[in-house]
Amino acid sequence: MDTESAATSTNGKAESGAPVRSVDRALTVLTILAREGEASLSQMARELRVHKSTVGRLTEVLVRHDLVEPPEGAGGYRLGVGCLRLAGATTARLDLTVEAQPVCDELSAEIGETTNVAITREGVAINVCQSEADTAVAMRNWIGQHTALHATSNGKVLLAHLPEKSLTAVLDAGLEPFTAHTLTRPAELTEELQRIRSRGWAYAVEEFEEGLNAVAAPVFDHSGAVVAGISVAGPSYRLPTDRLPDVREPVIRAADALSRRLGHVGRAQS
């Protein structure tokens, strides 16, 4: 009799503990496979800190429910089609604005400035969620507003992850100068977008409005695609350039939190 079986034969408290522990381990197996793509029993056992036979029993159950696929040849275990069915049922019900609001609220409270979530449609950024801290200087309501992709932090994050054809269309349409700091030369903007893709965040320093600075990071969905950007924006005297690096990390954490709410596992690397 193994430890899990023994645990179920003593008293009521133990009987409830072992099944819960098994469920926790099974969910951890799914998380490992989602993160790694595939893994062997030994790899999963090491991470779970249990015997390989324990993981073997867990995977047998998961395989029966199509949540895990058994190894083929020298490969490892992988997520099964059952996970796709579950993901489809969940993501069909996810509403970006509903998922984003608590993340925006928390980020705004932490930084003390306005936060926004934006998506891209037809060559512009559209703000779909906003939160203002009690201490923030009153700013306009950006929800529903269309802003230029090349001149805002959220816009540049979105622009950096557009398909090549869509990016070319934006560049060919011309880059309007909103301030003296707006990037209006396609070559210069293209270089900036490459940096954004590489580092995972964007600044906008008085590029859309004089005296307005912002930091943004990309938000990923369950498939790893960038579906939105989340930003912190504020007047330059409260959010000067030397403060932007301090704000950047909370913005990235918020982007990761929202990505997880949308079903993304880990942080995608572009």
Image (cartoon, grey):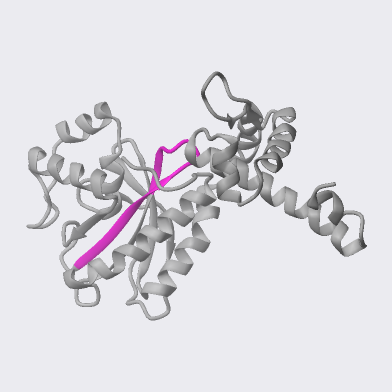
Q: Is residue 122 above or below residue 249?
A: above
Q: Position of residue 244 (x, y in %)?
A: 23, 67
Left or right: 131 in relation to 24: left
The reply to whether residue 3 is in sight is yes
- Residue at the image point whose x is 79% and y is 52% from the top: 3
Residue 245 lies in what quarter of the image?
bottom left
- Residue at the image point whose x is 75% and y is 34% from the top: 61
Q: Is residue 145 above or below residue 39?
A: below
Residue in front for this viewpoint, 3 or 165: 3
Q: Is residue 154 above or below residue 74?
A: below
Residue with the most extreme top position: 73
- Residue at the image point whose x is 65% and y is 41% from the top: 52
Residue in front for this viewpoint, 264 or 1: 1
Left or right: 5 in relation to 110: right
Quarter containing the C terminus: top left
Left or right: 260 in relation to 51: left
Q: Is residue 138 above or below residue 196?
A: below
Q: Position of residue 198 (x, y in %)?
A: 24, 45
Residue 227 falls within the magenta-colored stretch? yes
Instruction: Please report the bounds of the magenta region as a residue range.
Output: 212-228
- Residue at the image point whose x is 30% and y is 68% from the top: 247
**Magenta segment, principal secondary structure?**
strand
Residue in front for this viewpoint, 229 or 97: 229
The reply to whether residue 142 is in sight is no
Residue in front for this viewpoint, 32 or 140: 32
Residue 139 lies in what quarter of the image?
bottom left
